[in-house]
Every structure is written in C-alpha cells, then in structure tokens.
Amino acid sequence: MKKRINEFIFEAFGFPVLLRDVPVGEADSGEEFLDINMKVLEEVVAKSLITSSITLTGVTLKFLRGFLGLSLRDLGSEIEVPHTSLKLWEDNQDKKTGLDENQEKRLKYLVLLKVHTNEQKEFSKCLFDSKASRQNQEGPLQILSVYKYGA
C-alpha cells in the first residue's frame, strides 16, 4: 500500500494550498516525493480560485495568468486592463489587485473556458482511444485515478 500524507501545505505556486490525503512516492535513492500530477493540481487550484470568495492578489493573478498561458499584454487585452497595471499588481505579490468587478469576472471566465476545454480534451481522449474502446470488462466500473485536493 502506498504511503500517504494526511495534510500537506504546498507552496510552490507562491501561495499556500492545503492538500489532503496526498500520495507519496519513493525514488530509487530512497528519497520521498509527492506523487501528484501537477497539471491536475494546477487545474484544481485554478478552479478553486475562481469559485471561492478569496480576494485575488498579485501572486494569484500571476498563477492564473500562467495557467492561461498568456503574456501580460495578452491578458491585459482580454480583460481590458493595461499590461503595466497587471505587472505592478503581480510584483506586489500579496497585495490585492486593482481589478474591478467586471475585469475579475472576465478573468474568471477565461479560466473557466480553459478548464472546460481541458476537460473536453480529456473526455475526447477517453472516448476515441481505440485501446480503451476495445476492452471488454465485466464487473463493476473501475475508476483508475481520483484526485482529492481540497482547499
């Protein structure tokens, strides 16, 4: 049975994220590591940021911009904020951004679209993967991986 950590504060994004029931792997050298899929974790954190009542700060803005894969100029254009303002807010890390309600809604909508697109891609892979469709499994449906990252 794989080792698990009951609770772990993950801080690699620049802000704390509480992870629960985290699997731990062991390298050949004996060193332990968190056995998590970073892409999935990034998506879960992005979803949590846009659905919670948390105040967006410079560091969370930078995280969401990175999740979206947008430059300062591109994000500024999308949410109608000068890129210089975005840069200033990101540099002020823990301070609240100056996004107004409509700009924040546009940002959250962009994140929602990206999450939705990622989910569609994953579903399409499952649906059209010829290997998976050829399997003739009897018995209960087996769920291969479940992520339980809570905030």
Image (spheres, grey):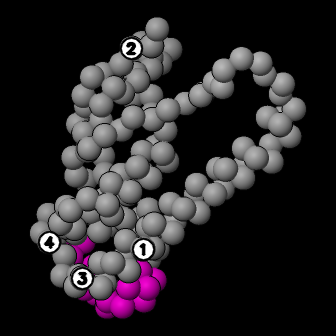
Badge 3 or badge 4: first in the primary sequence: 4
Label 1 – label 4 distance at C-alpha: 19 Å
Q: Residue 81's image quarter?
A: bottom left
- Look at mark 2 in the image and give the residue it sits on: 3
Label 1 – label 2 distance at C-alpha: 37 Å
Label 3 – label 4 distance at C-alpha: 13 Å
Element on which disc 3 rests:
helix
Viewer-side residue, 41 vs 112: 112
At horizontal 41% and vertical 64% (from top left) the residue drawn is 66
Does the residue at mark 1 contact the one at mark 3 (Cβ under 8 Å)?
Answer: no
Badge 1 or badge 4: first in the primary sequence: 4
Indicate yes or no whether the magenta region holds residue 94: no
Give the tally of numbered discs: 4
Label 1 – label 3 distance at C-alpha: 12 Å
- Mark 3 vs mark 2: in front: 3
Magenta-highlighted residues = 73-91
Element on which disc 2 rests:
loop
Element on which disc 4 rests:
loop
Element on which disc 1 rests:
helix
- Look at mark 1 in the image and give the residue it sits on: 109
When the figure is inspected, residue 33 is found, relative to residue 96, above or below; the finding is: above
Give the label on residue 101, or none.
3
At horizontal 14% and vertical 72% (from top left) the residue drawn is 96
Badge 1 or badge 2: first in the primary sequence: 2
Residue 47: x percent and y percent?
38, 57
Looking at numbered disc 1 in the image, what kind of residue is underneath it? Tyr
- Mark 1 vs mark 4: in front: 1
- Look at mark 4 in the image and give the residue it sits on: 96
Q: Residue 36's image quarter?
A: top left
